[in-house]
């Protein structure tokens, strides 16, 4: 075990990315079953929005601090 403390990704930015990626993948999965190309790409767009939102939140100070060596 490491003696260094850490948050293991438990930040608002990480949770936002995780939840939006889960929602987007679920939408895309349903679209594959329903054979809907538009719905598939809508789910992919939700994943992309989640990544951009997480990056913005991290830049805004809601993410983990960079690791120091």
Image (cartoon, helix red, strand yellow):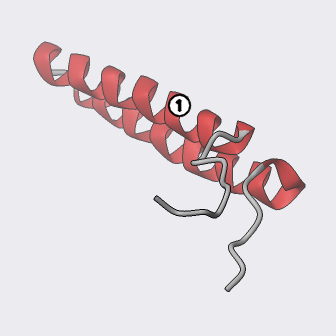
Dividing the picture into quarters, in which one does residue 39 lie? top left
The residue at the point 66 percent across, 54 percent down is 6
Q: What residue would you read off at disc 1?
A: 20
Nearest to the observer: residue 21 or residue 63:
63
Residue 56 at what x, y percent from top left?
76, 54
The residue at the point 69 percent across, 43 percent down is 13
- Which residue is the extreme one toward the bottom? 69
Nearest to the observer: residue 65 or residue 30:
65
Give the answer, above or below, for where 60 lies relative to 16: below
Dividing the picture into quarters, in which one does residue 10 lie? top right
**Element marked by disc 1:** helix
The residue at the point 15 percent across, 24 percent down is 32
Residue 44 at what x, y percent from top left?
39, 39
Residue 59 at what x, y percent from top left?
81, 61
Drawn side of residue 30 relative to residue 21, left or right: left
Quadrant the C terminus occupies: bottom right
Drawn side of residue 6 relative to residue 23, left or right: right
Drawn side of residue 30 relative to residue 18, left or right: left
Give the answer, above or below, for where 24 lies relative to 53: above
Q: Residues within 10 Å of mark 1 (few under 14, many from 20)?
A: many
Nearest to the observer: residue 7 or residue 4:
4
Drawn side of residue 33 relative to residue 26, left or right: left
| Number of numbered callouts drawn | 1
- Which residue is the extreme one toward the right? 60
The residue at the point 46 percent across, 40 percent down is 47
Residue 52 at what x, y percent from top left?
63, 52
């Amino acid at each position: 075990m490491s003696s260094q403390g850490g948050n293991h990704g438990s930040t608002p930015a990480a949770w936002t990315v995780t939840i939006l990626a889960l929602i987007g993948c679920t939408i895309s999965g349903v679209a594959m079953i329903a054979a809907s190309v538009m719905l598939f790409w809508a789910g992919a767009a939700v994943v992309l929005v989640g990544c951009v939102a997480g990056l913005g939140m991290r830049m805004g100070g809601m993410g983990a601090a960079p690791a120091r060596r």
